[in-house]
Amino acid sequence: MTEYVAPYLSLSEYACHHCNKLPPDFINYDGLYNTFFDDYWVILRGEFGGLIKVTSGYRCPPHNRAIGGESCSAHCTGFALDCRPVNLDVNRIVEIVEDKIPDVRMKVYPTFVHIDIAWTCKPRLRDNWVKGYRFHGN
């Protein structure tokens, strides 16, 4: 039986692919995880209407370093998801974020979209950790 951390998000998709763990403070973080998953992720997944594969959720610091992730990656906070629509309609994900969940930070790549709520972290580790920040990557 598949375990879920939120509707439409399995534990195996979200947990660190290196150690299979959740963020250390996942259970006791003042409901921010609930906001990210139960509100933002559910809206995105529900509006999309097709399969979205989560390719990266939480990353432990050693895993993040091993794959060349940014030193202050939002993935290390547990507040980030990289998602790839199976039909590769990245533009539809962008439209939904812009229209329905504009607070979410978003980085758009050719085959996937990164979303996060890194602005909720205190102190902010990067200048671009602000609500609604947009970045188009390579």
Image: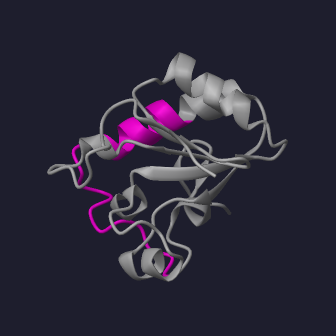
31 inside magenta stretch:
yes
| Residue farthest to the top, as pictured | 99
Say which quarter of the image contains residue 46.
top right
From this viewpoint, is residue 31 visible? no
Residue in the picture at 64% in, 47% down: 109
What colouring style does the render use? one colour
- Where does residue 97 sit, x and y in percent of width and height? 55, 27
Apparent side of residue 6 relative to residue 121 in the rendered image (left or right): right
- Where does residue 116 sit, x and y in percent of width and height? 43, 44
Residue in the picture at 48% in, 24% down: 101
Apparent side of residue 120 relative to residue 65 in the rendered image (left or right): left
From this viewpoint, is residue 122 visible? yes
Q: Nearer the viewer, residue 37 or 132?
A: 132
Apparent side of residue 108 relative to residue 27 in the rendered image (left or right): right
Apparent side of residue 18 relative to residue 2 in the rendered image (left or right): left
Q: Is residue 80 above or below residue 103?
A: below
Which residues lie in the magenta part? Answer: 19-41
Residue in the picture at 40% in, 74% down: 60
- Where does residue 76 sit, x and y in percent of width and height? 37, 64
Q: Is residue 21 above or below residue 70?
A: below
Q: Is residue 138 above or below residue 56?
A: above
Q: Nearer the viewer, residue 14 or 97?
A: 97
Image quarter (top left, top right, bottom left or bottom right) of the N terminus: bottom right
**How many numbered marks appear?**
0
| Residue farthest to the right, as pictured | 87
| Residue farthest to the front, as pictured | 138
- Where does residue 52 sit, x and y in percent of width and height? 71, 44
Say which quarter of the image contains residue 98.
top right
Residue in the picture at 77% in, 42% down: 51
Q: Is residue 118 above or below residue 130?
A: below
